[in-house]
Image (cartoon, grey):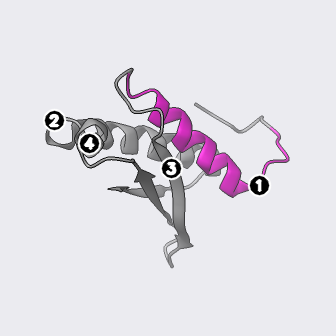
Amino acid sequence: MKYTFQITDMPPLTRIEEVVREKLMMLGKELPYTTRSQISRIRRIDSGEIIINVDIIVKRKSQIKIVLGKRGCRIRIMRETVQAELSSMFNQFVNVDMQVKL
């Protein structure tokens, strides 16, 4: 997706949270409805790259496997799609680090 012609008054943090939440909900029907995401840190390094740390918070230990998927496949796909969409949105490389927490 290209966001070059979209204008919004939402702050960048809110836009990032919306993209993460959207991709989290696209994972599938068995995803617990109590699952939420939280941006824990955003920083820019010398090369201009943006690094975003995201915590995905679940209520039960058994739900961690649901979010991760087999061999981490689900969270990897979600990270890659979030990363691609945010990189397009900000017109520079965005590295997303996701962790699942209780």
Q: Give the label on residue 11, or none.
A: 1
Say above or below: 40 vs 101: below
Name which of mark 2 and mark 3 comes first in the sequence. Answer: 3
Q: Which residue is mark 4?
A: 68
Q: Give the label on residue 70, or none.
A: 2
Answer with left or right where residue 96 lies relative to residue 50.
Answer: left
Indicate the amino acid at tag 2.
Answer: Lys
Indicate the amino acid at tag 4.
Answer: Leu
The magenta span reads 7-28
Indicate the amino acid at tag 3.
Answer: Ser
Task: Where is residue 81? Give x, y as percent.
Answer: 43, 37
Task: Tell me if mark 4 has few (under 14), some (14-19) or many (20+) residues whose alpha carbon lies within 10 angstroms of its own.
Answer: some
Q: Which residue is mark 3?
A: 37
The reply to whether discs 3 and 1 touch (Cβ–Cβ < 8 Å) is no
Name which of mark 1 and mark 2 comes first in the sequence. Answer: 1
Answer with left or right where residue 27 lies relative to residue 8.
Answer: left
Query: What residue appears at the point 45 percent right and 41 percent down from the top-left corner?
Result: 35
Name the secondary structure under disc 2: helix
- Most extreme residue toward the front is 60
Name which of mark 3 and mark 1 comes first in the sequence. Answer: 1
Query: What residue appears at the point 38 percent right and 30 percent down from the top-left corner?
Result: 31
